[in-house]
Image (cartoon, rainbow, N blue to C red):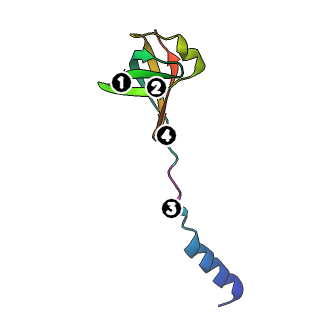
Amino acid sequence: MDVNTTLLAVGDMIYDGSARPAVPVPTVRYGDVLAVGERTMDVRVGGARLDGLPMMAHCSEASAGDRVRVVTVGAESVVDGILA
């Protein structure tokens, strides 16, 4: 076996193309505002209460009862829009 063939074989053992990490896909949910803080918001989404979610600056104008959009990527969620 020549050197190039050996190097290619070792490279194939080190790198397994099927072992690529999964890229998190954003999910969008809608919820109702329970309370608005200075930089966070408490929201009810699908029956679950999510306290202390970070929010975009323009969402600070929301008030209890408003409908908001919550975007989740991996384990992180953020309120990024007011619907009504």
Q: CA distance from mark 4 to mark 2?
A: 14 Å
Boundaries of the magenta span:
18-22
> Reading the chain from its start, which is encountered first: label 4 or label 3?
3
Marks 2 and 1: in contact by CB < 8 Å? yes
In the image, what residue occupies the spot 53% across and 10% down?
61
**Residue 14 image position (x, y, % from top left):** 58, 73
Give the residue type that dot 4 points to: Val
Local packing at callout 4 (Cα closer than 10 Å; few below 14, some 14-19, many 20+) is few
Q: CA distance from mark 1 to mark 2?
A: 8 Å
Check residue 25 in the rendering and tell me which mark sits there, or answer none. 4
Distance, label 4 to label 3, CA atoms, is 18 Å
The residue wearing badge 1 is 45
Tell me the crowding category of disc 1: few under 14, some 14 to 19, or many 20 or more residues within 10 angstroms, Cα based: some
Query: Which of pointers 3 and 2 lies earlier in the amino acid sequence?
Result: 3
Q: Earlier in the sequence, mark 1 or mark 3?
A: 3
Marks 3 & 2, CB-CB < 8 Å contact: no
Image coordinates of residue 72 in percent, x first then y, are 47, 33
Going by the numbered disc 1, the residue's amino acid type is Val
Q: Earlier in the sequence, mark 1 or mark 4?
A: 4
Using the image as rendered, state which of residue 42 and residue 27 is in the foreground.
Answer: 42
Q: Residue at x 50, y 43 (%)?
A: 24
Q: Amino acid at mark 2?
A: Val
Q: CA distance from mark 3 to mark 2?
A: 32 Å
Q: Residue at x 44, y 27 (%)?
A: 52
- Of circles 4 and 2, which is in front? 2
Of the residues shown, which amino acid type is indicated by label 3? Ser
Foreground pick, 22 / 39: 39
Residue tagged 3? 18
Residue 33 % position (x, y): 41, 16
Secondary element under disc 4, as helix, strand or loop, is loop
Nearest the eye: 11 or 80: 80
